């Protein structure tokens, strides 16, 4: 059985990765892709978890499903998506 701290750390990582993806995709719609790529290379999330890799819809769904399951194991209601 995993410790609660391990589960929480993984949930935080998945939440961070989802945040980066959402902001990366939003900025690609508004700005030059080379500028966006350069800016994201300096984010604290990238420094912590490595270079951002584009996620397909399937991969993003898998990330969100994993995050949802981890949050549920920590006692939140299914569908809340709030890290306690």
Image (spheres, grey):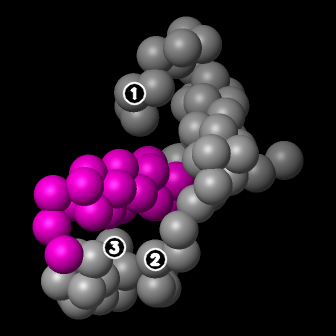
Q: Residue beneath label 1, please?
A: 82
Dot 3 alpha-carbon crowd within 10 angstroms: few under 14, some 14 to 19, many 20 or more: some
- Left or right for 35, reference 3: left
What is the x, y in percent for residue 35? 17, 83
What is the x, y in percent for residue 39? 18, 82
The residue shown at (60%, 30%) is 68
- Left or right for 67, reference 1: left
Residue at mark 3 to residue at mark 2: CA–CA distance: 9 Å
First of labels 1, 2 by sequence position: 2
> Which portion, as a residue range, is magenta?
13-32
What is the x, y in percent for residue 74? 58, 29
Residue at mark 1 to residue at mark 2: CA–CA distance: 23 Å
First of labels 3, 2 by sequence position: 3
From what the image shows, is residue 25 above or below residue 67? below
| Number of numbered discs on residues | 3
Element on which disc 1 rests? loop
**Front residue of this view, candidates 41 and 83:** 41
Name the mark nearer the viewer: 3 or 2.
Answer: 2
Q: Residue beneath label 2, please?
A: 52
Residue at mark 3 to residue at mark 1: CA–CA distance: 19 Å
- Left or right for 26, reference 62: left
Dot 1 alpha-carbon crowd within 10 angstroms: few under 14, some 14 to 19, many 20 or more: some
Q: Specify whether residue 66 is painted magenta.
A: no
Name the mark nearer the viewer: 1 or 2.
Answer: 2
Q: Is residue 78 visible?
A: yes
The residue shown at (58%, 60%) is 55
Asked if the residue at tag 2 contacts the one at tag 3, i.e. Cβ–Cβ closer than 8 Å, the answer is: yes
The residue shown at (53%, 68%) is 54
Q: In the rendered structure, find residue 45 and report the number of the disc placed on it.
A: 3
Dot 2 alpha-carbon crowd within 10 angstroms: few under 14, some 14 to 19, many 20 or more: some
């Amino acid at each position: 059985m995993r410790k609660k701290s391990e589960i929480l750390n993984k949930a935080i990582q998945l939440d961070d990765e989802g945040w980066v993806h959402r902001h990366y995709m939003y900025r690609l719609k508004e700005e030059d892709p080379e500028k966006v790529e350069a800016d994201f290379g300096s984010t604290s999330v990238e420094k912590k978890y490595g270079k951002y890799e584009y996620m397909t819809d399937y991969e993003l769904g898998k990330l969100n499903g994993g995050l949802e399951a981890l949050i549920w194991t920590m006692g939140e209601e299914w569908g809340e998506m709030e890290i306690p």
